[in-house]
Image (tube, rainbow, N blue to C red):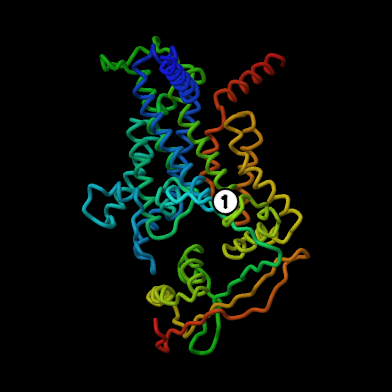
Amino acid sequence: MSQELLTNRSKILPKAIIFFFILACTALQTYAGIIKLACSGVALPYVCSIPEDPSLYPFLNYPMYRSAKPEGVTVPKFALIATYANGTEKQLTAKDFDLSDYWFNKGIIFSLSKKENSKVYEFIEAYERSGNQPFDSLRLDVTPLAIERQGVVQGKPHTVNQIFTNTGEAK
Amino acid sequence: MHLNSWLSKGLSKSLAFVDNYWFYPAPLFNLALCRIIFVGFQLGYLLIGNYRTEVLTRSEVPSLTYAPLPILQLLNYFFSWDAPPIFFLSAVFWFSIVFGILALIGFKTNLSLAIFAIGSIYLQSYLYSFGSFHHPQALMLVALLALALSPSGKLLSVDACNGQFFDKRSGERSNLNNFKQVNLLQASSPFARWPLLLVQWLFGLAYLSAALNKLVLDGPGLFTLDWMNGYTLQYYLIRDGLLWGSNLGVWIGQQHGLILIFSVIAILFEATFCLTLFFPKLIWLYIPTGALFHIGIYMAQRAPFFQYLALYAAFIPWAAVIKIFLYRLKRSAKAA
């Protein structure tokens, strides 16, 4: 034990407690962010039975933007189009639903693209409750943008999903 | 006998290393300044924008189901409810704000910081108990907890003023003529280094995790460099630019050559950031790069890692920088 440590016994206990805290934090972060990753390539069944993020919050894995994309990968450009009773159409945005961009994309755009219509109906109900002009149908159009070496190539737009609000489509 | 002495020597050396590394006396000024920066940032994060409304209305957002995170279950251990009621969330929010302000000015600093940190963890983990979560806040929450266990209120605080102006035993105000001025930049403590060092380690581990996630293969094999092909970052820039309304992201995402360079820089930065732990002088390269990196990510992809900009303060040797600045100022004044 270092001389300083021995001569200053009053500081040993706080140092031990703090060192335990340091060890716990660094170990949890290593476990959540690095060891878990090793499990994906190597078979370590006992170590790999780690609960999914964010179970160890605030200690997390950091996999943002992790998957590599090849040349020619397409980015979907979404447009949410409402059709009203008089036949007019309007592109709706997060502001129309009084939502943040995050909840608009997660709750409506992504749900529609995954055909999880029941989730979208809940947002439509909230939209109508707020006194907005009700629409007959809501459709999600996608324009694929292919990323090529020579630049971004715009594809043909197509409708990926459409839901109706007054025809009694199963919710 | 030999084994015993070998073990005892090894243990002694390890303990001495731990003591010298984590508990080497360091300037209290650095720690106190970081307290002000971290707490000030977190207070701003809670107060600016609609954080409180988000907390209070999260349970009303359609299609979300409440599944409390383990840390929230732990914090709710003594309460009988499954989901905390609105009045309690509101109370936690306002308690956090009040104790945050006290921590900022350094009044009963450790207690204030502890309540502020736990309150912030409670609110954030509640928000993330509805099926989606984000990364920027996590390191800040651990940093606040670490500060709560440190002597960060020994300087630049009301506590420090009380210690200087009042005689605790008599409870009387000292004669100001006898007041011994504390040299802010000289005061040090063996407990002033570890919280900032811990933040640095957590940064190193988090960036390493981000780099490995991009480089480690999912299936058989170990590593791949595919992430740096340019198309990957172009994809994310254009996708996020379109989703979150950043024209810069969409434009820059179409510059293949430039993005190729950015991809390599991003991976190099994340994979080697931990070198700053062993070669502290590298902070003068990595911290400005990191700041530009996160500002750029925000402008192009709207990913708000502002907490990291505040937490970078843990890397800066503030006392030494100010001393050098003052010395140069004095020298140039003399020369003039």
Spot occupied by residue B81 in the image (x, y as percentages of width and height): 23, 55
Spot occupied by residue B14 in the image (x, y as percentages of width and height): 47, 22
Residue of label 1: B213
Looking at the image, which residue is at 28% across and 57% down? B83
Q: Is residue B188 visible?
A: no
Spot occupied by residue B2 in the image (x, y as percentages of width and height): 44, 15
Task: Tell me the quarter of the picture where residue B166 sits.
Answer: top left
Quarter holding the C terminus of chain B?
top right
User: Is B168 located above or below residue B150 in the figure?
Assistant: above
Looking at the image, which residue is at 42% across and 49% down? A46
User: Is B53 located above or below residue B34 in the figure?
Assistant: below
Q: Residue furthest right?
A: A150
User: Is B187 located above or below residue A170 in the figure?
Assistant: above
Q: Residue furthest top?
A: B178
Q: Is residue A116 visible?
A: yes
Spot occupied by residue B51 in the image (x, y as percentages of width and height): 41, 53
* Chain on which label 1 sits: B
Question: How many neighbours does mark 1 have within 10 angstroms: few (below 14), some (14-19), or many (20 or more)?
Answer: many
For the image shown, how many numbered marks are present on the structure? 1
Looking at the image, which residue is at 44% across and 43% down? B42
